[in-house]
Amino acid sequence: MALRDASLRIFPGTFTAIVGTSGSGKTTLLSLLGLLDHPTGGQYLFDGVDVAGLDETAHDDLRGQRIGFVFQNSYLMADQTVAENVALPLQVRGVPTDVGDRLVGEALTRVGLDGFQTKRAGELSGGEKQRVAVARAMVGQPDVVLADEPTGALDTVSSQNLVELLRRIADNGTAVVVVTHDPLVAQAADRRIELTDGVTENGLAPPKGRTPSRPSSSMGLSPELDAMLAKLGLAPKPAAAQPVVTQPDAPSEPKARPGGVKTVRWSQELAAAVLAPLGRPLRSGLVLLAYLLGIAALVGAIGLTQSATGQIVTRLTDAASNQIQVTVNDPNDPFITDATRPDGAAARAAKLDGVTLATPVRSYSGQSNPMSRLPGATQTSFGGSIYIVQAAYIASYGYQTAQGDPSLLTNPWSGATAVLGPTAAQDLNVAQVGPGVQIWIGSHPVDVIAILKPTGDTLVDDTVFFSPAVDPYLTNIVESYLLVRTGKGYAEPLAKALPLALAPQNPGSIHVSTTSQLANLQAGINTDLTNLLAILAAVILILSALTAGTTMFLSVQHRAPEIALRRAMGASRASIWRIFTYEGTAIGLAGGALGAVVGTVLVWAVAHHNQWTVCIGTQTVILGLAAGLAAGAIASTIPAIYAARRDPAQILRTV
């Protein structure tokens, strides 16, 4: 309800009751008196100072130091102790902990709750919760206590006790203003102001037996606020200006209020932000899990890339030291592919000193050549590699056989035979070798003559080695080359000699891959793997941050009463923003630390399983921590801004 003609004066040491029907504007008036809302017209003087001339920071300071609030819903944080709830206004102000503990103890003693400091607020009765709320309102020694239906949810006995407590507070010199429907409260008040359809009655009359005097010339604010008012040129107004709060008799000295320290306030905000997730373990756990998965993916991707690349580099280096690949422009040229030709490349290369093996090799994709245990297959579960090789190829690498005889790849009857890697055998459902055990490529049967033992190389284990007789059945060739293996120290000189030895009329038609080409290959593999896994990890991290940000945004909506309460205690928008930013950053950092650990363990487990050397450095772990920190800060940006911009008066009207 909007106020239309509300004029009133509030006097120190006076218990004032504002009564009216629902919707008459009582809560709106209380929000204006508490500086939680701004009037669209008229004038509001607080101790002679026109609050319209103060900026938002001065409003926050004035509200936090000189006004206390008691709400119908006590708005206690149930997961915190009584002492922590009462100390909230002092934390907002930045009062040191030792001073705050003493003031909290004194406030609880005044409301009859001495010894309740360590009790959880959620364990208290309704009457006890309201007394804690009164202690919280009084702990900062305000000039005015504003109470909105404080007995609305209490039984008769608890209501009487609370009214007596408010009466004692007023008798000690604090102005008490209560918005109420309760006749018990109205009868106990020194003044009763009627509010009907936004219009006040008897709002300017002083209490019986009291004559208000001119307001004190000292505003009694904090040094920071005094300096700000002086800079604005604002001075106390005379009594004729109808100040809201005046002194009943002679001007008095301002109250000695506990002062705050900015660094203490910031440290207490940080502590509150770090401890806040503990009160909401499920929601905080989900946010933490999102960061953990994202950072673990990032660290794992980098670590696995480094470890896998290290393994590839080792194998390429070993291969480059004793082998050469020879190719020509036409991959189907029998000069390269036919090992039986007396004048072929294999025969010519084998005659050179230092050559230990010269054999054609052709490779195909398993996806392009469906295989099955039954004829006519058009689909296959096998997705590995296919090689057309001689028996000498398998022997040269030292692969051990689990079953069968791989030497039959080179057979006198030119039969179609196959040797399966262990993974390929599982994919093709071949458990053993024997007469009649075949796999089919379309309508062409191939006899399985051997199954290899695991080699430790996943690529080799997932390979099917066919005899040359199978080559006509296959499509989509990947590579075709002559593999030349050499004795130690012969690779480089043979690489130079092979073009002339194989094609003396046209040595330029022979292409030789040596160590330098393999080095370029390993660099390319490293770059490709790093880019691929980094993109994947980045996508996971972004999705994790979005999930965390969404969860935090929902948390801000759920914690609206806490935001309104802090603002009522004098917290600035910047303070609310810092708390939520600190909280999001802290969870992100914790998720980064746990994710770095999980990612490191993942890299170790995969590397150990594949017998790789673990390659993950301190820089990768630090990167995980930094990514968690950054993701937490970024993900909390929008929720923190949203929390800081929320209107406390609107929150209190709707919750």
Image (tube, rainbow, N blue to C red):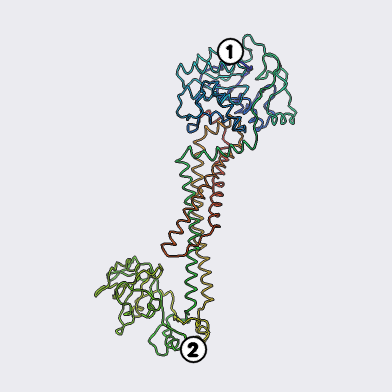
- Image: 337 above or below 317: below
- Image: 621 above or below 650: below
Task: Bin the neighbour count of mark 2 within 10 Å (Cα to Cα): few under 14, some 14-19, many 20 and up.
Answer: some
Element class at badge 1: loop
| Residue 419 falls in image quadrant | bottom left
- The percent coordinates of residue 407 (x first, y second) are 33, 80
- The percent coordinates of residue 480 (x first, y second) are 43, 78
Q: Seen in the image, is 393 located left or right of residue 594? A: left
- The percent coordinates of residue 413 (x first, y second) are 29, 84
Residue type pointed to by label 2: Ala
The residue to which callout 1 is attached is 190
- The percent coordinates of residue 643 (x first, y second) are 56, 38
The residue to which callout 2 is attached is 501
| Residue 265 falls in image quadrant | top right
Spot the residue most to the top. 209
**Number of numbered discs visible in the structure rendering:** 2
- Image: 479 above or below 565: below
Determine if residue 586 is in view: yes
**Front residue (pair 122, 384):** 122
Spot the residue most to the left. 435
Quadrant (top left/top right/bottom left/bottom right) for the N terminus:
top right
Q: Seen in the image, is 592 located left or right of residue 574? A: left
